[in-house]
Amino acid sequence: MNPATTSLRSLLKQALSFALAFAIWFSPIPAGLTREAWHLFAIFAAAIFAVILNSFPLLTASLLAVSAAVLTRTVDPGKAFAGFANASVLLVVVAFLVANAVVKSGLGRRISLLVVSVFGRSTLGLGYSIFLTDAMIAPAFPSNTARGGVLYPIILSLAQSSGSKPDDEKNRRLGGYLMFCGMASLSVSSALWLTATSGNPIAVSLADRYGVKINFGSWIVAASIPVLTMIAFLPLILYKLFPPGVTKTPDAPKAARDALRTMGPLTRDEWVVAVSFAFMVAGWVMAGTLNLSLAAVAFAGLGALLATNVLSLEDINLQGGTLVTFIWLAVLFALSGQLNELGFMGYVGGRLTSLLGGFTWPLAYVILLVLYVLMHYMFVSQTAQILALFDVFLGVGVKTGVPAPLMAFALLFASSYFSTITPQGGSQNVIFVGSSYLTQGELYRLGLLTTVFCMLVFLVVGTPWLLFVAR
């Protein structure tokens, strides 16, 4: 394409993003909203729109958004920059750095070779292995971000050992397929287990206000059929939506076994990484019981890897992309939280109640679920949306006649599977986005299609199942 044409298109996209911000900013403020809430919505919506259009990179859009919010006195500086001290944000950053030790030590390659030796006859088999592995380890992790920190280095090593590199367009797609399988698996496995993410117990306590009693056993019964259906079909659907290029690898299992023999026994660095990860995983699993900070556990693991010279300061310095991720995630996390604190999300919930008053409950149920999922475009945290909207949407559903258990579980499971709808839709996504195997456009397209598929599975398969088991 002509460079001049490309430049003109880029300028047009940027102009559209600014136009959206100005259009919302200067439009009449709805009754019931403060000026600050409406103006922050204008800034946040324009930033997300700019990223979707690819008119600005995520970092640039985030920096423009936070500077506009502070300089226009829409948001207090302390609150705008609070994300830089948020434990979830810090956990993501440390997970990036720790993942480098898994690759550098060779442990990631060893694990990937073991996976290839069992499932490696096809790329599709590797995709299924990611989903199954994540589903099995999910109940032990109260944080899907921490779980992503465990899965990512293994998936990265799988991609690299298959010859896939982000800067090699011919072989990039294989790594891209595996990376998105990692993102998608984290979203659906979080819906399978009550303990798979920190937001689930919060939502359960909110559902209790409406007489919906949920425990570990009733959760797994309710989740089993719809979530296992998603796991059964998603690797294949992603395989069709994003063909990895290399499809059949019949000789890969034997080659992997030969490579494992060549590697020999575990090296000293591999043992250190394995033990460090074991202690980190144990800390994450026991975090709730022992009242431990997930981020502090991760920092302890990183410190151990540095103290034992598995990682060096030079290794940390080379992770420049981690700083980029840290900045945009911290900014968007804080701004989305301010949207809730300033009352914008509560206002939306109130409007919904009045709009759906005359609908039959099945129609209201579908509309509420679709809106709840789509509103995740405005959030960078699943837990933040649960805190902002779960109670509101459940209350609206019950008032319109939707059975409380059905509405509660619909929102509970959506709070997990909608995390792939945007690259910033869940902090666990960020690790995989930072791999550079997928473009922003690919991430948004695959994320939307994956979320739509999961929602359809829940409506078609999950709804009758829940009406049967959740009464």
Image: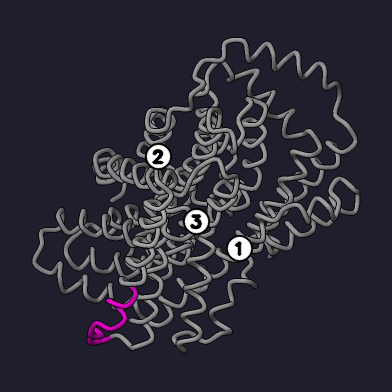
Front residue of 47 and 343: 47
| 31 part of magenta stretch | yes
State how far apart marks 2 and 3 are (Cα): 18 Å
Q: Position of residue 175 (x, y in %)?
A: 56, 33
| 441 part of magenta stretch | no
Looking at numbered disc 1 in the image, what kind of residue is underneath it? Ser
The magenta span reads 21-32
Q: Residue at x 63, y 15 (%)?
A: 252
Front residue of 454 and 315: 315
Q: How many C-alpha atoms fall within 10 Å of the one at disc 2: few (<14), some, or many (≥20)?
A: many
Looking at numbered disc 2 in the image, what kind of residue is underneath it? Val
Mark nearest the camera among 1 and 2 is 1
Are circles 3 and 1 on residues that touch, CB within 8 Å?
Answer: no
Identify the image quadrant of residue 136: top right
SS at mark 2?
helix
* Residue 88 disc label: 1
Disc 3 or 1, which lies upstream in sequence? Answer: 1
Q: Residue at x 41, y 56 (%)?
A: 7
- Residue at which label 2 appears: 227
- Residue at which label 3 appears: 426
Q: Position of residue 70 (x, y in %)?
A: 50, 84
State how far apart marks 3 and 1 are (Cα): 10 Å
